[in-house]
Image (cartoon, grey):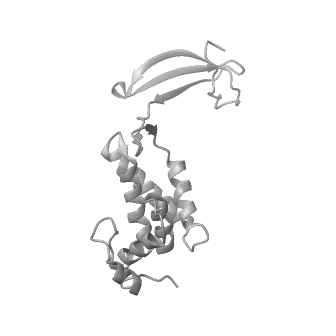
C-alpha cells in the first residue's frame, strides 16, 4: 500500500490492496478519475472521486455543525414512535427536508429545519406533530400544549398567528383531539 490506506476493493477479487497508477481531473474538474491496479490479481479498474458539499446547520446558540440526515431521521422517528406512521412516510419527509435545506445553501438555521419538519408532521400525524413541537418550541407547561393544539386545529402554528386568550384555552376552543 501507498501513503494512505486504501479502502477501495478490487471488483475482480475483492482484495483491499490496490495501487493508483494514474489520476486526472474529470467531469470538468468536479471529480478525480483514478486508474487502479489490484496488487493481488493485477486487475485494472477505474474509480471516480466526487466531493460532496458539506451543508452546515447554525444552531440556536450560534454554533455551526454539519447537517446529519441520520440525526433528522432519529428526531422524526422519536416523534412518530408508537404512532401509525409508515417508515416510508418518515423517509419521504426526511428526504423532502434535506432537499429543501440543501437547495437553500449553507449554513441553514436549525429553526428552518424544525419548521419544515413540523410542516411535514402536521400532514402525517397530529400527535407526532405535538411531540416534535414540544421539543422544537421548548414547551414549558400544559398551556403551551393547549395553545399549539388549538393552533393545530385551526391549521396554523401558535407561533404563526395570535395565541388564544386564556379564556379560549380554558374552554378548549379550537383544541384538536386525536382519537
Above or below, comparing residue 117 to residue 172 in the picture: above
Task: Pinpoint residue 56: horizontal percent, then vertical percent.
Answer: 41, 39
Above or below, comparing residue 172 to residue 82 in the picture: below
Task: Pinpoint residue 178: horizontal percent, then vertical percent.
Answer: 49, 82
* Residue reaching furthest to the front: 166
* Residue displayed at 54% across by 49% down: 70
Residue in the foreground of this view, choosing between 146 and 156: 146
Task: Pinpoint residue 124: horizontal percent, then vertical percent.
Answer: 46, 71
* Residue displayed at 55% across by 69% down: 86
* Residue reaching furthest to the left: 162
- Is 173 positioned to the left or the right of 42 in the image? left
* Quarter containing the N terminus: top right
- Is 104 positioned to the left or the right of 43 in the image? left
* Residue displayed at 36% across by 52% down: 112
Task: Pinpoint residue 90: horizontal percent, then vertical percent.
Answer: 51, 62
Q: Quadrant of residue 143?
A: bottom left
Amino acid at each position: 500500500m501507498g501513503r494512505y490506506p486504501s479502502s477501495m476493493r478490487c471488483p475482480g477479487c475483492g482484495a483491499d490492496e490496490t495501487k493508483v497508477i494514474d489520476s486526472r481531473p474529470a467531469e470538468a474538474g468536479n471529480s478525480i478519475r483514478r486508474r487502479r491496479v489490484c496488487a493481488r490479481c493485477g486487475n485494472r479498474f477505474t474509480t471516480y472521486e466526487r466531493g460532496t458539499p458539506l451543508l452546515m446547520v447554525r444552531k440556536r446558540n450560534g454554533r455551526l455543525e454539519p447537517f446529519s440526515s441520520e440525526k433528522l431521521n432519529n428526531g422524526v422517528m422519536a416523534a412518530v414512535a408508537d404512532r401509525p406512521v409508515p417508515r416510508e412516510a418518515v423517509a419521504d419527509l426526511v428526504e423532502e427536508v434535506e432537499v429543501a435545506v440543501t437547495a437553500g445553501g449553507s449554513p441553514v438555521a436549525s429553526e428552518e429545519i424544525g419548521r419544515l419538519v413540523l410542516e411535514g408532521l402536521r400532514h402525517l400525524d397530529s400527535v407526532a406533530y405535538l411531540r416534535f413541537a414540544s421539543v422544537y418550541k421548548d414547551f414549558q407547561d400544559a398551556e403551551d400544549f393547549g395553545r399549539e393544539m388549538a393552533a393545530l386545529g385551526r391549521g396554523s402554528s401558535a407561533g404563526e398567528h395570535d395565541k388564544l386568550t386564556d379564556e379560549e384555552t380554558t374552554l378548549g376552543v379550537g383544541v384538536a383531539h386525536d382519537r
